[in-house]
Image (tube, rainbow, N blue to C red):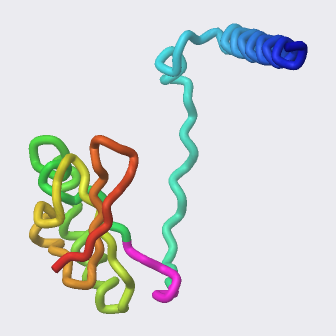
Amino acid sequence: MIYAGRLLWARTVVVAAASVGCAVFAASTGAQSIIDEWSTVKTPPAPSLANVTLDRKTTALLLLDLNEQTCNQERRPRCIASIPRVKKLLTNAREAGVPVAFSVGGGGKASDINKELTPTRTSRSCRRDSTSSSARISSRS
């Protein structure tokens, strides 16, 4: 019983200290939320672009959420506009023998992936189950 009492007391002290620390930090910044400081945030400079050489044995191309539920003209027109560049990247990766994996978001399935980027038999697709935190990986046939 003494051990349980000490554990409860220690937990109370830790929670109280964390609360005080958060309150002091919030008071020192003078902001109620990130929105209050939005206009003062300084973004870092854009990284310089450089050519790279990838090792196809240790590299894979991941194409994420390029299915009709998440990449469409109504919701994400920039996604649709990027398809020709993504297609070129995909073609180069396939020609180099780089493994390609697709993820499918928004309740889609592999057959919903943009037709210009159609997975091959050796591609893998991953669909997240919206009712859990797990993902299902399957071969494209």
Position in image of residue 80 (x %, y %): 16, 56
Q: From this view, report whether residue 85 is shown above or below residue 99.
A: above
Mark yes or no: residue 103 visible: yes
How many badges with numbers are in the image? 0
Q: Is residue 73 above or below residue 141?
A: above
Q: Position of residue 19 (x, y in %)?
A: 71, 12
Occupied quadrant, residue 15: top right
The quarter of the picture where residue 116 lies is bottom left
The quarter of the rendered structure image containing the C terminus is bottom left
Residue 18 percent coordinates (x, y):
75, 17
Residue 43 colored magenta?
no
Magenta extent: 55-61
Q: Nearer the viewer, residue 139 or 112?
A: 139
Q: Position of residue 101 (x, y in %)?
A: 33, 72
Quarter holding the N terminus is: top right
In this picture, residue 23 sits left or right of residue 70? right
Q: Is residue 48 left or right of residue 6?
A: left
Q: Nearer the viewer, residue 122 or 39?
A: 122
The residue sitting at 36% across, 91% down in the picture is 96
Residue depicted at 37% across the width and 82% down the height = 99
In the drawing, does residue 95 fall left or right of residue 140?
A: right
- Residue most extreme to the front: 1
Q: Does 98 sit above or below residue 118?
A: below
Residue displayed at 55% across by 29% down = 41
Say which of 6 and 124 sits in front: 6
The verdict on residue 57 being magenta is yes
Q: In the displayed structure, does residue 21 sit left or right of residue 73?
A: right
Determine if residue 53 is in view. Answer: no
Q: Main secondary structure of the magenta part?
A: loop
